[in-house]
Image: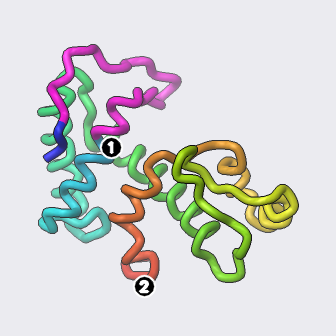
Amino acid sequence: MPSFTQSTATSSQDYRGNKRKWVPEEDVTLVACMVDLHNVGTFNADTEVKTDYLNELEIMLEKFLPRAMLKVRHNLESRIKTWKNDWAIVYDILKGKDNSGFGWDEHRQMVVTEDAVWNSYISSHKEADQFRHNSFPYYDQLTSIYAKDRATRKNT
């Protein structure tokens, strides 16, 4: 289980339309819970028992962030889907075929390369542009969860 103390702070209930604004504490806790479930091996984020996995995450988050009121249907599914898509983009940049020149800056938690390499890559991978100047702080944790299936194309 994550080594977090129970949150006494009120979580962000700031919604923009139907989108929830996640606060860093919620993101960190969600990723830690996902990694814990993955490491225990009882649940897999991509199996046919996705509902059980998400329900277990909801229970864990309620324990660590009781005021966040994070729910499977409206919050967790969307956040996890977004992260998985973003992770796949970064993973493909770093591990993709014929993508030499890219590196990972551990300190800044972002993809790095020369401008010419970025320009060339983005011309055919427009979705990658968001990571040119932005960090992706959960890359390592999500890699521990998703990389094995990505490498084998299992469950895709």
Q: Are marks 1 and 2 in contact (CB under 8 Å)?
A: no
Determine which of the numbered discs, if any, sits on residue 30 in the image: none
Residue at figure coordinates x 37%, y 37% from the top left: 27
Q: Amino acid at mark 1?
A: Leu
How many neighbours does mark 2 have within 10 angstroms: few (below 14), some (14-19), or many (20 or more)? few
Element under disc 1: helix
Q: Which residue does the numbered mark 2 point to in the structure image?
A: 152
For label 2, the SS is helix
- Front-most of residues 136 and 150: 136
Q: Residue furthest bottom?
A: 152
Q: How far across and how far down the image is residue 1, in percent? A: 13, 47
The magenta span reads 4-29
Q: Earlier in the sequence, mark 1 or mark 2?
A: 1
Residue 64 % position (x, y) = 17, 32
Residue 11 forms part of the magenta stretch: yes
Q: Observer-nearest residue: 24 or 22?
A: 24
**Mark 1 burial class by Cα count in 10 Å: few <14, some 14-19, many 20+:** some
Query: Between residues 7 and 3, which one lies in front from this camera angle?
Result: 3
For label 1, the residue is 76
91 with respect to 111 (left or right): left
Residue at image coords 27%, 47%: 32
